[in-house]
Amino acid sequence: MSERSWLTLSQLTGMIRSAVEEWSRRTCPVLIVAEVSEIRRGPTGHWFLRLVERNEDGIVAELQAVVWSRQAQIIEAFRRETGSALAAGMEILMSGSVGYHERYGLRFDISGIDASYTLGEMQRRRREVIERLTREGLMEANKALKLPAVIQRIAIVSSGGAAGYGDFVRQLEANPYGYAFRLRLFPAHMQGDEAESSVASALRLVARDASSYDLVVIIRGGGSQVDLSCFDSYGIAAAIARCPLPVMTGLGHERDESVADMAAHTRTKTPTAAAQAIVTRVRVYEERIEELWGTLSAVASSLLASAASANDVTAMRFARAAAGRLANARSRLDQLVMKLGGLAPGTLRAIDQRIGVGVRSLWQSSLAGVADARSELRSRATRLAVRSLSRFNGEEIRLESMDRAIRHLDPSRILQRGFSITRFAGRALVSDDELLVGDELDTRLASGRIFSRVIGLGGKGEEG
């Protein structure tokens, strides 16, 4: 092998670099579409990315990319336009040039990122997911489930450290009616590349023990369109549709409805709104029970009054009838006595005996009629008493059950567990919206009261 037949490694890589740079000069700028698999910022301000292309079999192409520090403003521009930082899992349209380094290999030097492409691609995928769910009959599946009238056992799918989760729990525990709720958190990633599989997995765990819960709530604080794009995925929406329990969402975005919202039984705007909707539903049920109890009491009182009135009318009717028959009998007897005054004593005795028998028969007939009337009155009174007692017994059992629940939710018991009630202007305080600096507050503890003055007001804390 002659000396001219081989190259050093640096000579080979130099030739590759020259060829790449020549090609790049002729074709720049190059537009490419790829998914960001990794992104990090170096200590000198450069941004290093790993770009990939995937198909059903996995990654089919991969290339390292860089945004040099002198052009780092394009990263900030992307964040301003999309409302979210450039992150792994996003598909982006980039412009730039291909470069080659003898030691570090091939790379793509990014000079621009089209944020509108990323937002448009998200909308395209969203439409495809909606069409697929509709085609598979899943879009209305969860809405067909019946929401319990009283919601007490709640499975929560959220990030345990998120502000939205804390807002939801505090809103339920501090509800002004003292309702008690049993909550269990099923932790999940609520944004990023892992969110779709994480939320779907949490919903499957809930489904395995569905009989232990009344409702599933998926909550996340506010965020940008890109941050919340995971809730437009097929995996989360399909898991919601197939869940055997009604699902309520409180995803912290008011402008647009996510696909997850569309597939859920009930959509609320924020985690706080989700908690308020649950408390309101329980309150509506309690008010309905109170209304039914009032109606039942009024009906029972009316029935008893009507029965008493009917009994009085019947008794008077029988008394008048008996008195009339006796008066007629006496009148006929007087007439007979006058007609028979001239008859012989024996004949009179016989007539007197017959009259006595007639009178006794008439009296017995009257007594029998009164007895029948009294028997009918007693029978009707007994039936009315049995029906009233049965209805009152049923309602008494329901009232005892409600009384036990109310005693369990006694505010004094809640205070003894370490909670407190703060009042402003005589009303329980659930938000600082009405407060001004200098307002006086009254805080009630399990033992004692604290009077305080507002020296500052905080924020809402809805961020996820």
Image (tube, rainbow, N blue to C red):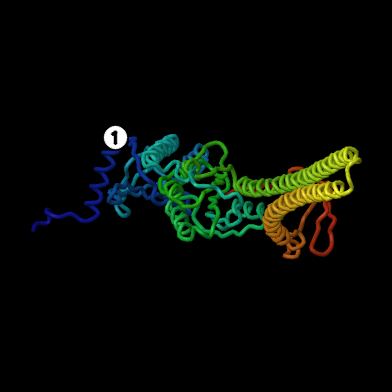
Q: Would residue 437 be found to the left or right of residue 248 on screen? A: right
Q: Would residue 257 be found to the left or right of residue 406 on screen? A: left
Q: Would residue 115 be found to the left or right of residue 215 on screen? A: left
Seen at 55% across and 51% down, the residue is 217
Residue reaching furthest left?
1
Closer-to-camera residue (167/323) = 323
Residue under numbered circle 1 = 27
Seen at 84% across and 59% down, the residue is 449
The crowding category of the residue bearing disc 1, from other C-alpha atoms within 10 Å (few below 14, some 14 to 19, many at least 20), is few
Q: In the rendered image, which quarter contains the N terminus? A: bottom left
**Quadrant of residue 34 within the rendered picture:** top left
Residue 340, x across and y down, in percent: 88, 40
Count of picture labels? 1
Closer-to-camera residue (101/66) = 66
For the residue labelled by badge 1, is the local secondary structure a helix, a strand or a loop?
A: helix
Residue 61, x across and y down, in percent: 29, 48
Residue 178, x across and y down, in percent: 71, 55
Closer-to-camera residue (162/19) = 162
Residue 162, x across and y down, in percent: 58, 54
Is residue 138 in view?
Answer: yes
**Quadrant of residue 312 within the rendered picture:** top right
Answer above or below: position of 71 versus 361: above
Is residue 70 in view?
Answer: no
Seen at 36% across and 48% down, the residue is 51
The kind of residue on which mark 1 rests is Thr
Q: Would residue 356 be found to the left or right of residue 141 on screen? A: right
Closer-to-camera residue (144/399) = 399
